[in-house]
Structure formats: structure tokens, C-alpha cells
Amino acid sequence: MRGTGHGDQAVEHGVARTALMVAAARAIETHRPDSLARDDYAEHFVRAAGTCESWPLRPQEVPAGDDDPLWGRLGRYFGLRTRVLDDFVLRSVSAGARQVVLLGSGLDTRAFRLDWPPGCVVFEIDQGPVLNFKQEVLDGLGATPGARRVPIAGDLRDDWEKSLGDAGFDPASPSVWLAEGLMLYLPGDAERRLIDAVDRLGVRGSAVAFEVKLGSERREVRSSAVYSAAKQQIGVDLLTLFDAEPRPDSAGHLASRGWVTRVTTPFDFTRTFGRGPEPEADDALASNRWIFATRT
């Protein structure tokens, strides 16, 4: 399936292109014999884009396997992250929350592929062209969501709360917030505003999960094969996309506001599942933290 030329160009450049990178990784993960997460829609997004014909979508198309820094190691990272956040969302809705907000939703298909309890609504916030591209591909597949899905076009660097409220979000009911692969690219002020919004709108029983990088990476880390492979193989220069400003302590801020927070590393979950990236020297993943918070 190829795009029509209307929405596909929206995901071909800049941060939006990272959504295609993650989709390809999810496609590979889906077809691994020891898969941690399944996303049968992911490969169709990659096929619909105009500049991804050479990207692998199956494990056998990655000859070096897990030793490949991009589609092996980083790809396995994305598969692990997908599974961990899937589990987080499902635990949260099982505990009673019925509103899920995907911040910078990109090509996320959780509304379609997770087993939702009755009454759940999934709000997806991202820029309009990205949402249009995703909708075009999903419509072509005849995909039907398992929960009520509400796409909201907006820029998370601007005021998006009113749009969320206008779309039916109820600030008096518990909610689940997910920022998967988002904070890395936001300016510090935008991250602060986003966390403040989650704090204002997340009543007791709400939960949030997000990913950050701690501090500035050393020159040796910035020379990592993960970064160079992404730039050389698919034209994604992660180092220039990551925001270089000092990062706010969002986990600490939520804790100060009464949220129960847990800061983890990806390697914690590699040990839990027995699959995923292991630490290595001058590691591009070493400063990544996955943060989970609940309001009790």
C-alpha cells in the first residue's frame, strides 16, 4: 500500500520520521519468534510512506539480528518499550480509569490492538498531517478501534488543553496519560507545561508514563553506533532532533504534587522479560529513563 501523496509526506521528515522508524521496529518485533509486542498495523504505515522502501519489516531482513545497532538493538528497545507501556495502560484501565490520552500519538495503534474494557475512550493528540496520514492508512485497511477513538489535531508546544476538553475529556474522571518517545524532542518549557497540565487534569486514580533522557551525553556516547546507523541508514539524525536544553525534573515535580512516582531504566525490564537491550560501553540508551506515576 502506498500513500496518495497527501498525508504521507507529513511523516517523511524531522521528528515525524521517527514515528516511521518506530513503526518499522514494531513490525520486526511483531514477527519475532520471541515477540514482546504485536502491532499488525505498523508495517502498513512504513509501506505507505514514499521513502522507506528499503527498510526491513521482518527479522529475516536484518541479517545481523540483534547485533544490528538500529534494527536490532534500538529496534528491540522499541519493542520492549511498547510492551511495557501496553501493560501500563491496561493495568491503569483495569484499575478503573476509562480515559486514555496519547500525547504525541504518532502512529500509535493502541486504540485498535489492545483489549479494552467497555466504556474506554482514547484521545490521540498530534499534528494534523500525521493524524491524517495514519487515518488514511487505517481506513485503507478497514481497521476498527476496540475503544472509542478521538483524534485531536494540535501541537503539544502550544495550548492543547482546550481542544482536549472540547473533544469530551472529563477532568473530573480518572485518566491515563502516555507520552511515548515525546519528551526527548520537546523544549524544556513545553515539557513543564505538559506535566503541569497532566497534574491539573489528572484526578485521583489517574496515571502517567513518559520517557526522558538524563543530562547531556558524553562525546563518546554521541558517537554511538545507534546514532550513526540511524543517520546513515534512514536519514534520522536523532542527535539534532533531541532538544539540547537542560531537562526539567518532571518526576520530581510530580512527586512534589502528590503523585507516587517510579523511575526505571529500560534494562530493568530487559531483566524482567529476559529480552531486550543489555547495557554496553558508551551506551546511547544508558541515560534513558521510563517514568511511571499515579495519583492516589
Image: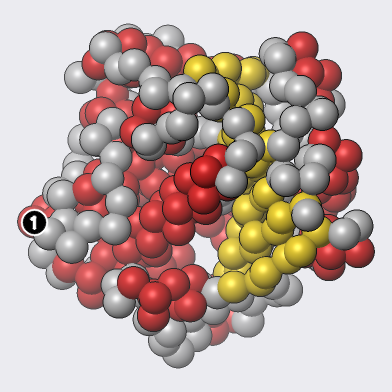
Mark 1: give few (<14), some (14-19) or many (20+) Cα within 10 Å. few
In the depicted view, which residue is nearer to us: 75 or 198? 198
Q: Position of residue 191 (x, y in %)?
A: 79, 49
Residue at the (79%, 45%) spot, across then down: 204
**Which quarter of the rendered picture does the C terminus lie within?**
bottom right
Q: Is residue 176 above or below residue 166?
A: below
Q: Is residue 80 visible?
A: yes
In the depicted view, which residue is nearer to us: 63 or 90? 90
Q: Residue furthest bottom?
A: 281
Q: Position of residue 170 (x, y in %)?
A: 76, 23
Residue at the (67%, 69%) spot, across then down: 262
Quadrant in the picture for residue 243:
bottom right
Q: Is residue 109 left or right of residue 289?
A: left
In the depicted view, which residue is nearer to us: 211 or 175? 175
Q: Position of residue 185 (x, y in %)?
A: 65, 49
* Residue type, mark 1 in image: Gln
Q: Residue furthest right?
A: 256
- The total of numbered circles placed on residues is 1
Q: Is residue 295 left or right of residue 135?
A: right
Q: Position of residue 239 (x, y in %)?
A: 57, 60
**Which quarter of the rendered picture does the N terminus lie within?**
top left
Q: Is residue 185 left or right of residue 162?
A: left
Residue at the (12%, 59%) spot, across then down: 33
Q: Is residue 49 above or below residue 94?
A: above
Task: Provide the residue designation for mark 1.
Answer: 60
Residue at the (11%, 64%) spot, across then down: 63
Q: Secondary structure at mark 1?
A: helix
Quadrant in the picture for residue 4:
top left
In the depicted view, which residue is nearer to us: 229 or 279? 279
Q: Is residue 122 above or below residue 227?
A: above
Quadrant in the picture for residue 190:
top right
